Amino acid sequence: KNPSQALIHFEQAQALNQASWQPFFLAGEVHRWGNNLTDAETSYKRALDLIQPGPQKATVHSALVAVYLGKKDYAGAARHVMASRPHAPDMAANDRQLVGLYLEMGQEEKALVYLERLAADPSAGPELHETIGWMRVDRKDYDRGIQSLQIALERQPDPARREVLSLE
């Protein structure tokens, strides 16, 4: 509840065990919550230097993604999403994060690569296929666009939305 007390505690923990990534990560969290993104970045990077490969490393990369997004450094955020991939327990979430970043950066072709990976999952919803379809049509890739829109139409459970899709 008191960020400055928490930081003192984490700094003491860092001094006691400089090989542990956790106090650095937790200090980064406190800094990020306080919107001190520069100190958060420094703490997270120190944690990243100390942590072993695994899901926790993906967590630290994700925290750095949040820092870079806060700084509007989308390329930096994308680098950390990509760096987290070997450690990410949920690749679909990682792909969705990349889609959002690439769209934010205006790199729709790169976003399409990951949208199509997500669409390969048989449980992918109609909205995803519709998005891909319209993006393809906008790029004059009509055959693939119509194919994606057809899948969206087939998977759409809402009769009203199905009607709109069939008329567009």
Image: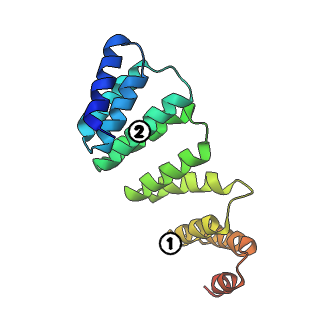
Total tally of numbered discs in the picture? 2
Residue for badge 2: 63
Q: Out of 156 and 145, give the one closest to the viewer.
A: 156
Which quarter of the picture shows residue 41?
top left
Which quarter of the picture shows residue 90?
top right
Q: Out of 6 and 76, give the one closest to the viewer.
A: 6
Disc 2, SS: helix
Q: Quadrant of the C terminus?
A: bottom right
The answer to whether 126 appears left or right of 3 in the picture is right
Name the amino acid type tagged 2.
Ala
Q: Position of residue 158 (x, y in %)?
A: 70, 79
Question: Residue 91, relative to residue 25: is it above or below?
Answer: below
Residue for badge 1: 138
Which quarter of the picture shows residue 107?
bottom left
Q: Residue at x 50, y 68 (%)?
A: 139
Q: Residue at x 68, y 59 (%)?
A: 124
* 10 Å crowding of disc 2: few (<14), some (14-19), many (20+): many
Name the mark nearer the viewer: 1 or 2.
2
Question: Residue 144, relative to residue 44: is it above or below?
Answer: below
The answer to whether 122 appears left or right of 167 in the picture is right
Name the amino acid type tagged 1.
Asp
Question: Residue 13, relative to residue 1: is it above or below?
Answer: above
Q: Position of residue 76 (x, y in %)?
A: 35, 41
Mark 1 to mark 2 CA distance (whole Å): 34 Å
Label 1–label 2 contact, CB within 8 A: no
Q: Residue at x 38, y 45 (%)?
A: 66
Question: Residue 112, relative to residue 30: is it above or below?
Answer: below
Q: Out of 36 and 48, give the one closest to the viewer.
A: 36
Colour mode? rainbow
What numbered label is drawn on residue 25?
Answer: none
